[in-house]
Amino acid sequence: MDAGNRYKMPRFPLSDRMLKRKNPCDDLDRFIPNRSAMDFDFAQFMLTGGKVEKENSASSSPSKDAYRKHLAEIFSMNRTRILAFKNKPPPSVDGVQEFSSLINWSSVTKRSRFIPQSSERTLDAPDILDDFYLNLLDWGGNNVLAIALGNSVYLWDASDGSTSELFAIDDDIGPVTSVRWAPDGQSLAVGLNNSHVQLWDSIASRLVCVCHDFVP
């Protein structure tokens, strides 16, 4: 093998690594204006407007000045930007414009939200633990509120206001630290202080299963 050919460099070493742009408009420079988004007639008017006004200053009058100002407002000639550095936004859908024109926004009023200043009903929950990290209340889909009070769990039915005790545990595994309803509104998960989780059937008032040493 010839040593000269082994160290011979290709003629265009970077030609294969050059990326080809799909659309020239995709890669725009923030310092170079986008010609496709520019209004050249407006740019010429803005650039030559001062010269024309100087030439016509002798024949100007308040009525002519007011007329020119009115034309500038109609044709949006009051804008001062000449160069465009990004593409124009796509036009809005005609249906949206027609629908917006039919809405009378002046008739739309925001409804005020009524916030009661007093409680509608007060439930007495003695011996409830005041601990931020405990979940001792949970409202189920069956409109029943589960309440953990010490070593017991109570169920309060909001439809008729009745209260019943679901179960009570011994002091060596208590107290109850969390309650959570299942989506069906029948099964209730109860977390205990000894890291056990019990699953209860609230309709039959029976223990379904126990998960030992459960760590979330």
Image: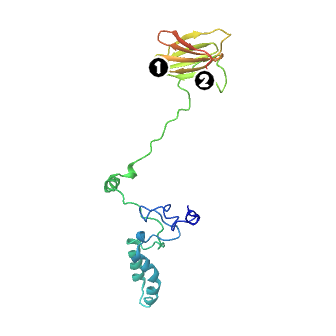
Question: Circle 2 sits on which residue?
Answer: 135
Q: Nearer the viewer, residue 155 or 158?
A: 155
Q: Are marks 2 and 1 in contact (CB under 8 Å)?
A: no
Whole-percent x, y for residue 27 in the image: 47, 63
Query: What amino acid is labelled 1 in the image?
Result: Gly
Which quadrant of the rendered structure holds the N terminus? bottom right
Q: Secondary structure at mark 2?
A: loop
- Please tell me in which quadrant of the rendered image residue 66 appears: bottom left
Mark 2 vs 1, N-terminal side: 2
The disc placed on residue 118 is none
- Work out whether 47 lies above or below 2: below
Callout count: 2
Q: Does 120 appear above or below 67?
A: above
Farthest residue in the front direction?
Answer: 1
Please determine whether, in this image, residue 33 is positioned above or below residue 194: below
Residue at (57% x, 22% y) in the render:
137
SS label for mark 1: loop
Colour scheme used in the picture? rainbow
Q: CA distance from mark 2 to mark 1?
A: 17 Å
**Residue at the image point whose x is 47% and y is 41% from the top:** 112
The local crowd at label 2, few if under 14, some if 14 to 19, many if 20 or more residues have their Cα within 10 Å, is: some
What amino acid type is highlighted by mark number 2? Asn
Query: Residue 216: x, y in percent?
Result: 60, 25
Q: Which residue is tagged 1?
A: 185
Residue closest to the eye, 192 or 104: 192
The answer to which image quadrant residue 148 occupies is: top right
Relative image position of residue 149 (x, y in whole percent): 62, 16
Residue lying at the far right in this picture: please name it. 172
> Residue 153, image x and y in percent?
58, 14
**Image check: 210 left or right of 59?**
right
> Looking at the image, is 53 positioned above or below residue 161?
below
